[in-house]
Amino acid sequence: MKTLFTKMKTKILIITIISLFLGSALFAQENKSILVEQSEYYESLSISGEANWDKYQNYTTSNAVNSAKDCELNKRVFGWHPYWMGSAYNSYNFNMLSDIAYFSYSVNPNTGSYNDIHEWRTTPLIDLAKQNGVKVSLAVTMFSGHATFFGSAASKQRLIDSLISLVEFREADGVNIDFEAVPSSQSENLTAFMIDLSNQFHAAFPQGEVSMAVPAVDWSGTFDVLGMAQYVDLFIIMGYDYHWSSAPNAGPVSPKNNGDLWSAYDVTRSVIYYLNEGIPKEKLCLGVAYYGYEWATSSGNLNATTTGSGTARTYNTAVNYAQTYGREWDENSSTPYYMYQSGNQWYQCWYDDEVSLSYKYDMIKAHDIAGIGIWALGYDNGLSTLWDLIEEKFSSCGNLQTEGFFSDMGGPKGNYFNNEEYQFTISPVGADSITLVFNEFDVELNYDTLFIYDGLSTNSPLLAELTGELIVSPIIAHSGSVTFRFFSDGATVGEGWNIAWSSNGFPPTENQEISEIRNISVFPNPFSDVLQLQFTELTESEAIIQIYSLNGNLVGSQTANCNKGENSIDLSSIVSQIPQGFYFLKITFQGKNFSTKTIKLCKISND
C-alpha cells in the first residue's frame, strides 16, 4: 500500500518524465488536433458534393432518429457538422440542438479568402436547421500561416467581409472561429482580430453571434480570453486530444479526471482554468468527443507505450468494437476503453460513451457553464443513445436529478492539486433541502479547506469549513441549494473527497456495483447479508469492517482475514441488529482507512 507521500512522489515523477520527454508538446493542441488531422485527410480524398460523401460514408436516411418530442433545452448544445458527413444531418435530432456549425470555411492566410467553403452555398442543412429553430454558424478554420495573415490588414478585412457576405447569403446566425497552433508571438494580433471581427459582425447582424474554439490547455498563453470575453459571444473548450494520434502512450482522449495514473490535466481542470481566466460561465461550453483513438501498443497494460499512430474511431465504431472485445472502465479518468490482441500485437482504444459523457454533463451542470460543443455530429451514425442522454441531462423532458456523486479534481482515485481555488453550486429544480454524505475526506490540515454554503453563492450562510482527515456526519442545506468553494495552498496534497448528495431528505443511493475506492472493490449494492471485498494490492492481512449510519453513528463492526482477490464477508450478525436502509462502510487494514460510497441494505423476507 503506497503512502500518501509515495503516491505524490510517483505522480510528480511521472509528470516530470513526460514533460521532459515531450517538452511543451504534451497535447494535440501542440501537435495536430483531431480537427486538423481529419481536415487534412478528407481534403486529400478530393471528393465533393453531399451525395458523393454519403456514398463514401455509406450513409442513408434509414439511419434517421429525429424525435418529434416537444422538449426545451436548458443548456446550449452546439454541434459541428463536418462537410465530409454529407447529408447525415437528416438523422440529427434537431430538438436536442441549439446551434450547428457548418465545418468549414478554410482560410487562405495569404489572402483572407477561402481555399474552400464546400457546400455552404447549397446545403439543405441550413434551411432544415432554421426550420427547427436551431441557430447556424459558419465554422472558420486556419491551422497555419498566422503571422502572414495577421500581418496583412487587407487579408484580415477580406476575411471579415467574406464571412459577413456568406452569412448574409444563407441568412445564417453566426461565425465560429477555430484558429489552431497560433504562436504566442501572435497573441495580441489574435485578440485584436477577434475584437475587430466581433465589432463588424455585430454591426452587420445585431442578433448575430461570434463563437470561438479554444484549446484544452493553452500552453503558451496565446489566447487572451479575458481580453476577448467582452466581444466574443461564446467560447468552446476543445475538451479532447489529451491523448492524440501520435501520443507516446495510449490513454484517455477526454478524461474527466486523472486519478493517480494520468497527467495533471483533464476536462474538469480545463473548465476551471477558463472560468478563472475570466470567461463568464454563461459564455463557456465544453467540447465533447464523439470519437476515440485506437493505438497499437507494446502491451496490454494501461498507459502502455504506442508502437504507431492512432486511428480515429467514431462513437458508433468504438461502441461496436467494445461489444466485441469487452468494454473496460478506467476510474482514474472516468472513461471507457477496450483492448485486444491480434497475433502478438496489442491494441487499445480510448473513447467516450453515454456513461463517461454523463459524468461530464453532471460536471457541466455543477459548474453551471453554458453547455456543450460536439465534435462531431454524425459520428454516432444515427444511433439515438447520445441524443437520449442530451435529452435526459439538458432538457425539460429529462428526469429531474435528485441525487449524485462528485469528487475533488483528482477524481475517485487521485489526489487533488496544489494551488487550487474554485467554486460550484448544486441547485436541483424543486429541491427544498440537500443532504451531503462524505464517503471520503482527506485534505492538508489547516492549509487546504473546503467551504460549504447553504445557498446559491459564497454570500450564503456558511454550513461547514472542513480541513484535515475525517468522516463528516451528513450536512444538510435547507435552502435547496448548496455552494462549494475549495482552496489549496502550494505544498502538500491529500486524497480529497468523495461526496454523495441527494435532495428533499432522501439518502443518496447507488444501484450498481460500488466504484473502486483506491484498491478496494465492494459489491453487490444493494446487499442482504454478504458482501464481496476485492483487494487488488494486498498480501494476507486482518481487516476491520465497520458499518456507519448516514448520521455517522457506528452500528456494527467485524474483523476478517483478507487476501488479495475476492473475500466473502458474512455480515449477518450485524445485519440482524440493524434495520434495512442506507449505510456506508469504513474498512481499516495495514494502518489505512477507506470508506465506501453509500450502500443499501435490503433484508430478504422469509415469507
Image: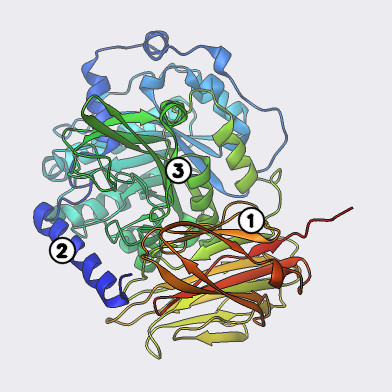
Q: Which numbered disc, 2 or 1, marks the residue that appears first in the sequence?
A: 2
What kind of element bears circle 3?
Answer: strand
Which three-letter amino acid code belongs to the residue tagged 2? Thr
Closer mark to the observer between disc 2 and disc 1: 1
Q: Quadrant of residue 489?
A: bottom left
- Viewer-proximal residue, 249 or 129? 249
What kind of element bears circle 2?
Answer: helix
Q: Quadrant of the N terminus?
A: bottom left
Q: Do the residues labelled 2 and 3 touch (CB within 8 Å)?
A: no
Looking at the image, residue 356 lies above or below residue 432: above
Answer few, some or many: residues within 10 Å of disc 1's Cα (few below 14, many 20 plus, some between 14 and 19).
Answer: some
CA gap, disc 2 and disc 1: 40 Å
CA gap, disc 2 and disc 3: 32 Å
Residue under pointer 2: 16
Answer few, some or many: residues within 10 Å of disc 2's Cα (few below 14, many 20 plus, some between 14 and 19).
Answer: some
Residue at horizontal 72%, vertical 69%? 575
Could you say where residue 569 lies in the image, as x and y percent from the top left?
58, 63
Residue under pointer 1: 525
What kind of element bears circle 1?
Answer: loop
CA gap, disc 1 and disc 3: 35 Å
Could you say where residue 522 lies in the image, as x and y percent from the top left?
54, 59
Which three-letter amino acid code belongs to the residue tagged 3? Gly
Residue at horizontal 48%, vertical 39%? 353
Relative to 406, is 313 on the left or the right? left
Closer mark to the observer between disc 1 and disc 3: 1
- Viewer-proximal residue, 140 or 41? 41
Q: Which numbered disc, 2 or 3, marks the residue that appears first in the sequence?
A: 2
